Image: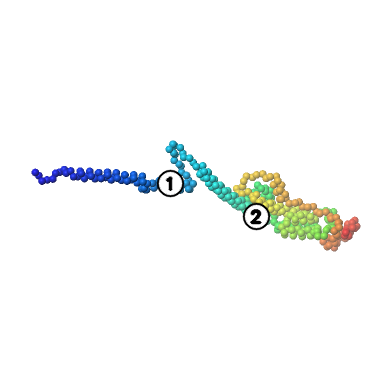
Amino acid sequence: MSSLPPLHSPQPQRRWGAMLLMLLLAFAIGGLAVGYAMRAGFDLGLGSTSEARKGATGDAAAEGFVPAQPLGANGQAPAVDPTALVTREAALAGQLTALEARTAAVASDAAAAGTQAARAEALMVAFAARRAIDRGTGLGYLEEQLRTRFVAAQPRAVAVVIQAAHQPVTIEDLRQGLDAIAPTLQSGAGADWLTQLRREVGNLIVLRKEGTPSTAPVDRLARARRLLDDGQVEAARQEVARLPGAAQAGAWMAAARRYALAHQALDVIETAAILGQAAALPAPARAPAAPEAQTQTQTQTEPASAPAAPAAPVPEASTTLALGPLDISFARVPYARAILAGLPVLLHPDRLFRQN
């Protein structure tokens, strides 16, 4: 017999079978332990995902966001809570109302700012036009600005200002012109001898109330010069119109009237700018002015016509005979006129006495 061991030994097969049996036994024991633990309510960490999902859903609901609900077992959507729906609608309505209020406030502030800016620009244009008229210079670009901003509200005033700028007249021009024609205004040269005689006779004896200004040509001319220095051109023009030689001062009267009309039109334009009647740039379509607005504009832009020369005052209780050197001056009257001076006294002797 041989002493060598056999090639096929049964021991390795026994080891592998024992190991497989032990693995199966351990798996079975682990499965039984897990099942027992789940039945007993032990936390094994398997429900953390579901709890996280529940927490995320709660946070979203707290923020006002409700995700789409899954369908039920029968394919129908779950019931919606009416109270929660009404609360959500009320919250959304409040937010929309607040947004609308803020939008309206912003729009109102923007509109007010635009209106104030347009008003300020219109005032600047009106002031610049007045400065140009006072200096006797042309309007230049201001002419187009006046048409764009004020022609719809005050068309007549704009036309008067533009026409005055084409024929400029200043206070200094009027003052120099009045000094040049002063001798003619006082003497009334150019009238016929009968008119001059009547004027001289009428100026010999003058009845007027105490405190009233003198009607002598020298005094009227002095008042006209003072009014020109104060810028009251229309009042100065009315004083010149009552002088004896007013008929020979047509050119000066026309220039004074243009100056007065231009400044009255500038007053109307400035008033329109202050009241916000000026159109903002770009200018809207030109609309016809209402008849009432045109009537008001004509009333404001056209100065009152020169009043007629006052009639000879009728002696009253407070009427006295003025014997001042400005009213009667026989030193510069020829003898023939001195004789004629007695005619009113002979006809009306009661004028020599004060009536009580």
Q: Say which of marks 2 and 1 sits in front.
A: 1
Secondary structure at badge 1 equals helix
Residue 146 in view in this figure: no
Q: Which mark is residue 242?
A: none
Residue 131 in view in this figure: yes
Three-letter code, disc 1: Lys
Position of residue 212 in the picture relative to residue 127 (left or right): right
Residue at the image position 36 percent from the left and 48 percent from the top: 42
Three-letter code, disc 2: Phe
The image quarter containing residue 248 is: bottom right
N-terminal-most mark, 2 or 1: 1
Residue at the image position 21 percent from the left and 45 percent from the top: 15
Secondary structure at badge 2 equals helix
Q: Which mark is residue 54?
A: 1
- Tell me the CA gap for discs 2 and 1: 74 Å
In the image, 79 versus 186, the foreground residue is: 79
User: Residue lying farthest left?
Assistant: 1
- Residue labelled with disc 2: 127
Structure colour scheme: rainbow
Residue at the image position 18 percent from the left and 45 percent from the top: 11
Residue at the image position 60 percent from the left and 48 percent from the top: 282
Q: Position of residue 78 (x, y in %)?
A: 46, 40
